[in-house]
Amino acid sequence: PGLPLPAALLRPDLWVAEVVYRPLETELLSRARGLGCRTLDGGGMAVFQAADAFRLFTGHEPHTEDMLDDFAALAAGPAQ
């Protein structure tokens, strides 16, 4: 919870990424987006790391769009 850095450092010309899986929408990302920054949450990183591992171990191409959809549904559900 809270911001990991002073909000005064956020400017609209920045990309702001936070590799947090739960919640995907953190206070940092919300504040940065509100100030016009482009943002990236931890969901994409989790999915694409898993996709690369799947490809490496199986030799098959993963269905990343389905994986992204499934991850979003799981991340939106109640914490376990």
Image: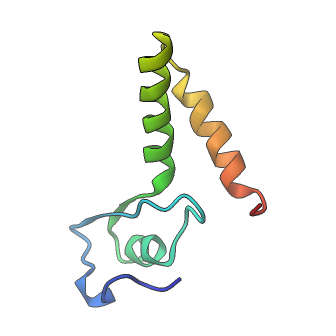
Where does the image place residue 7, in percent across and percent down from the top left? 33, 87
Q: In the rendered view, would you say 68 is above or below 26?
A: above
Q: Residue at x 51, y 39 (%)?
A: 47
**Residue at the location (36% across, 77% down)?**
35
Q: Nearer the viewer, residue 58 or 70?
A: 58
Q: Position of residue 17 (x, y in %)?
A: 35, 61
Q: Please state the horizontal and vertical placement of residue 25, each as a whole percent of the image.
A: 55, 66
In the image, residue 3 above or below residue 36: below
Question: Farthest residue in the top direction?
Answer: 59
Please tell me which residue lies in front, 7 or 55. 55
Q: How is the image coloured?
A: rainbow
Residue at image coords 34%, 71%:
36
Looking at the figure, which quarter contains the C terminus? bottom right
Residue 35 horizontal side relative to residue 10, left or right = right
Give the residue displayed 48% in from the left and 86% down from the top: 2
Depth check, front residue: 26 or 12: 26
Q: Position of residue 76 (x, y in %)?
A: 70, 56
Tell me which corner region of the image, top left, top right, bottom left or bottom right, holds residue 41. bottom left
